[in-house]
Amino acid sequence: MRGRFSEVIARQLNLFEEQDAEFLRRVDEAERAYDDADREDAEEVYGRYQVLVEHGTEALGEMRDAYAGTLEPEDAEEYVAEFNQTVVDRLPRFGLEIEDV
């Protein structure tokens, strides 16, 4: 089901993926490094991955909040909920804590 803000959110996430393509590659590499890490190094490698995920989540939250700030409060609430769910669906690694930023 497409929401009222689905087109603007799709454009925002497309822009994020285009402008931050190098960052997203680093996140993919960090995740692969964690998957390939031996037991001794796994915690440290996962910590590096988690820092990148937190950075991406915060960047998405800032994008979301900047746009929400241009809307009337009831519209902003709907937009934020739709944005968060779209992140969960489209960029799940950043969706785990998107509601908390």
Image: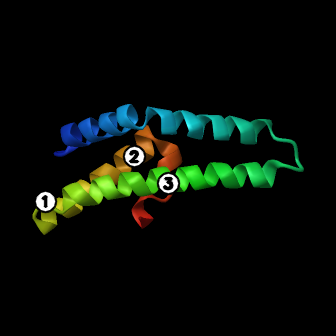
Q: Is residue 44 above or below residue 90?
A: below
Q: Is residue 81 above or below residue 3?
A: below
**Cβ atoms under marks 1 and 2 closer than 8 Å:** no
Give the mark nearest the N terminus, 3 or 2.
Answer: 3
What numbered label is drawn on residue 87?
2
Q: Amino acid at mark 1?
A: Thr
The mark total stands at 3
**Cβ atoms under marks 3 and 2 closer than 8 Å:** no
* Mark 2 secondary-structure assignment: helix
How far is the residue under mark 3 from the one under mark 2?
14 Å
Q: Residue at x 54, y 50 (%)?
A: 53
Viewport quadrant of the C terminus: bottom left
* Mark 3 secondary-structure assignment: helix
How far is the residue under mark 1 from the one under mark 2?
20 Å
Which residue in the structure is indicated by mark 1?
Answer: 70
How far is the residue under mark 1 from the one under mark 3?
23 Å
Which residue in the structure is indicated by mark 3?
Answer: 55
* Neighbour tally class for label 3: few under 14, some 14-19, many 20 plus, Cα within 10 Å: few
* Neighbour tally class for label 1: few under 14, some 14-19, many 20 plus, Cα within 10 Å: few
Give the mark nearest the N terminus, 1 or 3.
Answer: 3
Q: Residue lying farthest left? A: 72
Residue 14 lies in quadrant: top left
Q: Position of residue 9 (x, y in %)?
A: 25, 42
Is label 3 or label 2 in front? 3
Q: Position of residue 73 (x, y in %)?
A: 14, 68
Is label 1 or label 2 in front? 1
Residue 95 visible at all: no
Q: Amino acid at mark 3?
A: His
Give the mark nearest the N terminus, 1 or 2.
Answer: 1
* Left-right relation of 18 to 67: right
